[in-house]
Image (cartoon, rainbow, N blue to C red):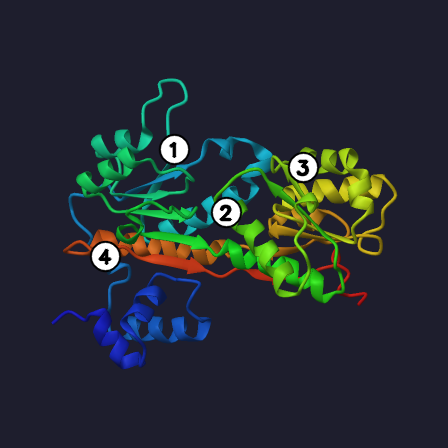
Amino acid sequence: MALTTKDIALLAGVSQSTVSRSLNNSPLISVETRRRVLQIAEEQGFEFNANARGLSTNRTNTIGVIYPDDYLDHDVSLYLGSLLTQLRKILEQWDLDLIVSFKENRKTGIDSIKRLVMRKKVDGLIIVHSQSDTSTLEFLEKSDIPFVFLHFYHNSGKVEGINQVYTDHFTGGYLGTEHLIKLGHRRILCVSADAEGEYAQRRRGYQAALEHHKIAWDPALVLFGDRTFQSGYNLVLAHGDLFDSVTATFVHTDTMALGVMEALKATGKRIPQDIAVVGYDDVELTAYFQPRLTTVHQPREELATLACERLVQLLSAKRSLRGKQIKVQPTLVVRQSCGAHLA
């Protein structure tokens, strides 16, 4: 009788899902546990990646990844580019290829999701796109193709029936604001993006933290940029008096935060002595600027891993599975720009 992951789980004293993740090198499993499971599997002659290879002989072994149009804009694509790298790394562990496309062909207007599915180009979809119109959702349901929404939360009327993995941006907005409050700041400027979805959630978290600490929310202390470095820089130049009136600013993307920091330095401000700065996303680019940026970390690796694992579950299932909402918690990364090391 062939050895199963259930047998390995019993031998290793762990759950079956832990065995599956260990065999596929999931970063969610500790090195020690993964090593023990792999050793038992090897000793027992278990064939690695059996669940991925055994999905179906009639599959393409290709996953479609749908990205938003503004992914082509360098300033706003840093986080999403890093997320795509994680997706590729994880899918390759399952011996799955990926096709990256946008929601629509910008020249023909043809819906890329419908094109990939109808031409049988992919076995499943990971959709990293903020908009999900009713017709697309109905098409996906009728086509019976597995799909997972990633990063952007889709609050549709059928939310319970879909699968999505996303960051808790309300908590992220709360964390960044409360950190500054605990450092003694009472007048905190919020620099956000003029958009709903994740940015609206970050703003609500900002407002909730102020209210929890008995600080009146002032709409005049909320500015909007377009998520680019230049936008952050220009906001400082255009609203110098406002930046002079606060002791801290919470900027809702790292790219804009870096622009804000450079403009503040150019106008003679010291960071964090004169004004503290906190960003959001924790992109790699922040390593090249001084002072190092304190920021809210979006767990890219965990988000990508959970989305890929859920999609493989859907592909492997012999019957339809119920929709699953997976909300991942962000964390605060404290560096130099907030002044915590001076407190």
Q: Position of residue 279 (x, y in %)?
A: 65, 51
Q: Secondary structure at mark 3?
A: helix
Q: Which residue is tagged 1?
A: 101
Q: Which residue is tagged 3?
A: 229
Task: Calculate the distance from the C-alpha at mark 3 to the C-alpha at mark 1.
Answer: 26 Å
Mark closer to the chain start, 1 or 4: 1
Task: Calculate the distance from the C-alpha at mark 4 to the C-alpha at mark 3.
Answer: 41 Å
- The residue type indicated by label 3 comes to Phe
- The residue type indicated by label 4 comes to Arg
Mark closer to the chain start, 3 or 2: 2
- The residue type indicated by label 1 comes to Ser
Q: Position of residue 195 (x, y in %)?
A: 53, 38
Residue drawn at the location 31% of the way across and 52% of the way down: 163
Nearest to the eye among marks 3 and 2: give it: 2
Mark closer to the chain start, 3 or 1: 1
Outermost residue toward the right?
268
Q: Residues within 10 Å of mark 4 (few under 14, many from 20)?
A: few
Q: How many marks?
A: 4
Residue drawn at the location 75% of the way across and 60% of the way down: 185
Assess whether mark 2 and mark 1 are in contact (beta carbons under 8 angstroms): no
- The residue type indicated by label 2 comes to Glu
Residue drawn at the location 84% of the way across and 53% of the way down: 274
Task: Calculate the distance from the C-alpha at mark 1 to the C-alpha at mark 2.
Answer: 22 Å
Nearest to the eye among marks 1 and 2: give it: 2
Q: Position of residue 73 (x, y in %)?
A: 55, 31
Nearest to the eye among marks 1 and 4: give it: 4
| Residue 52 visible | no
